[in-house]
Image (spheres, rainbow, N blue to C red):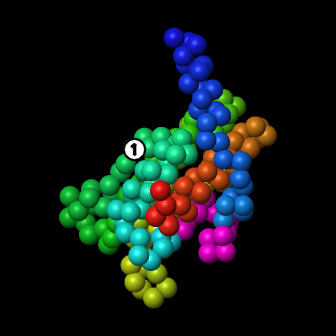
Amino acid sequence: MQKHLVLILAILLFAGCNTKSTEETANIDNPKINPNSAIYEVAVQQGITHQEVLDSLKSVAVGMNFAASAHFEIDKSMRLRDIEPQGIKEVYTYCHLGMGANILLDHPEFLVFAPCRIAVYEKPDANNIMQLYLGLDRPTFDLKSIKNPTERAQKSAQQLEDGLIELMHRASEGDF
């Protein structure tokens, strides 16, 4: 049994690891990361539907070895309480144990930020037209809450963040 767990962990650690940095995967249309904000946000390209974004998130996440562990339909819950959500409001949680294990091994308290969350939501754009967005609570920003994070944890948080941002960008373009 223990050999199987070690094998599974080894597969998760090495399968699908993304060695590109966020800067390498970003193009000129992608927003830069604000180091002073926990939130990274990207607008979904015009013509890409909500369902296409969800299908893309699912497909790309699997290909990148992210496990989608939960889905919260905040907008539906708001409607059940007679609150108009003013557009789509959903949260999806993703886990990549291969990328996150080193953070958790060095700093178990980081579990309060796990699993990682990507929000799918609508809000008015600059022209007051409802626009679909993807937003992320950045793991590297969350790691700032840990006193004296190890170098290994910092590298893992960056790798995890880079992977999630790649996932977001690919989904915002309807990639599969």
Residue 101, x across and y down, in percent = 63, 33
Residue at 72% x, 62% y is 23
Q: Quadrant of residue 107?
A: top right
The foreground one among 1 and 107 is 1
Magenta includes 32?
yes
Q: Check the image and name the residue furthest to the right.
A: 151
Residue at 69% x, 42% y is 156
Question: Is residue 145 in view?
Answer: no
Q: Is residue 62 left or right of residue 83?
A: right
Q: Is residue 173 left or right of residue 163?
A: left
Q: Check the image and name the residue furthest to the top.
A: 1
Question: Is residue 60 in view?
Answer: yes
The residue that mark 1 highlights is: 70
Secondary structure mainly formed by the magenta segment = loop
Q: Secondary structure at mark 1?
A: strand
The foreground one among 64 and 5 is 64
Residue 149, x across and y down, in percent = 74, 40
- State how many labels appear: 1
The foreground one among 142 and 5 is 5
Residue at 66% x, 47% y is 18
Q: Check the image and name the residue furthest to the bottom.
A: 127
Compared with residue 8, is residue 154 higher up or lower down, i.e. above or below? Answer: below
Q: How packed is label 1: few (under 14 Cα within 10 Å), some, or many (20 or more)?
A: few
Residue at 39% x, 56% y is 55
Residue 110, x across and y down, in percent = 61, 39
Magenta includes 62?
no
Compared with residue 122, is residue 78 higher up or lower down, i.e. above or below? Answer: above
Q: Which residues are magenta?
A: 27-42
Amino acid type, mark 1: Ala
